[in-house]
Each structure stands twice: as structure tokens, then as C-alpha cells.
Image (cartoon, rainbow, N blue to C red):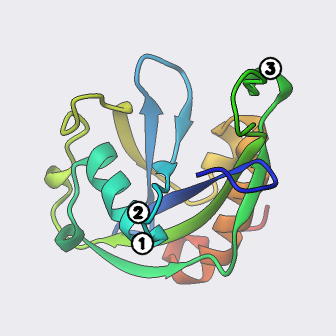
Amino acid sequence: MIDSEGFRANVGIILTNDEGRVFWARRLGMEAWQFPQGGIKKDESPELAMYRELKEETGLDEEHVEIIGSTDDWLKYWLPKRFIRHNTYPLCIGQKQIWYLLKLVADESCVNLTHSDEPEFDIWKWVDLWDPLDEVVSFKRNVYEQAIRQFAPFISSGFGRRL
């Protein structure tokens, strides 16, 4: 779903464990790391999209996680010009995302990156909350920072760390 301004509706997921570390995954066959995320389908709520994307990208089901919170509003990023497909309609210039903070309440062995027929990720690891800001692709960095800042008070490793 692309809105009238050219932003594709999307959800982002920050999954945390009992130690306050966050799930960080490498895109299949690339050296690009990111949090799970994906588009919201027509007639799908952000929460339903989040659970669908969680299952597709990590193999985790609703019972494996607890929702701790979500961002107050849409967080937006613009795509670099080289990624904009000018021959498509409607034209997508970026993404607007509702981010969810989830806590893993099941054993991490439930994570299954090959659950989907078209896996997004090939490797995952637990990292400190702020580490992704140093590794995520630059055009997503501002949105990641906004989401992490909103969620840091709810993640034990987020206390006391300054950007």
C-alpha cells in the first residue's frame, strides 16, 4: 500500500530477549543487516502485518512473543534515488513504518529463518540495542534511531547508553 505522498506502509520489529539484547539478521546472500520488517497489505492492520512478517522472516508465532509497545506514529524514510522505480505507479519514494517492540518468551531455538519459501535472512544474532545504528544502511539510520530511542526505556541494555 502506497499512500498519496508516495510512502509504502510498513512495519518494523525489534525483538528483544531476557538479557536486553536485540535480534539482528543478515539479508540472504548480502552483507546488509537489519531488523525484520515488511509491507502492510490492503485491509491488514499494522499488528496483523507485524505477526505475518514475524512468522515469514523468523518463523516465530504470536505465542512466542509478547508485545511490549509500538511507536507513537509513523516513522518515515526516503529511498535513495537509485532505488526509486520511476516506471511504476503509484510511485514509491520511501517507507512509513510502525515499529513494534517484542520480547521473546519462547526458547530461541524456535527461530527458524528458513520457515518461508523465500527466506529474507540467512544468519541472525543477538546484539546490544544501539549496535544496529552502526551497521544499518545509511538511509534507514534515522528511523532506526527514532525507534530505538522510543523503546530504550523498556529494554534493560538501553539504560545509560548515549548516542
**112 left or right of 29?**
left
- Tag 3 secondary structure: helix
- Mark sitting earlier along the chain (1/3): 1
Question: What is the count of numbered marks?
Answer: 3
Kindly identify the residue that appears in the image at 67 percent across and 81 percent down.
72
Q: Can you see residue 159?
A: no
Image x and y of residue 135, in percent: 65, 37
**155 left or right of 16?**
right
Determine which residue is flagged by label 2.
50
**33 left or right of 94?**
left
The vertical placement of 96 against 119, above or below, is: below
Q: Residues within 10 Å of mark 1 (few under 14, many from 20)?
A: some
**Front residue of 119 and 156:** 119
Which mark, by number, is residue 82? Answer: 3
Q: Amino acid at mark 2?
A: Met
Contact (Cβ within 8 Å) of mark 1 with mark 3? no
Kindly identify the residue that appears in the image at 77 percent across and 36 percent down.
79
Q: CA distance from mark 2 to mark 1?
A: 5 Å
Determine which residue is flagged by label 1.
47
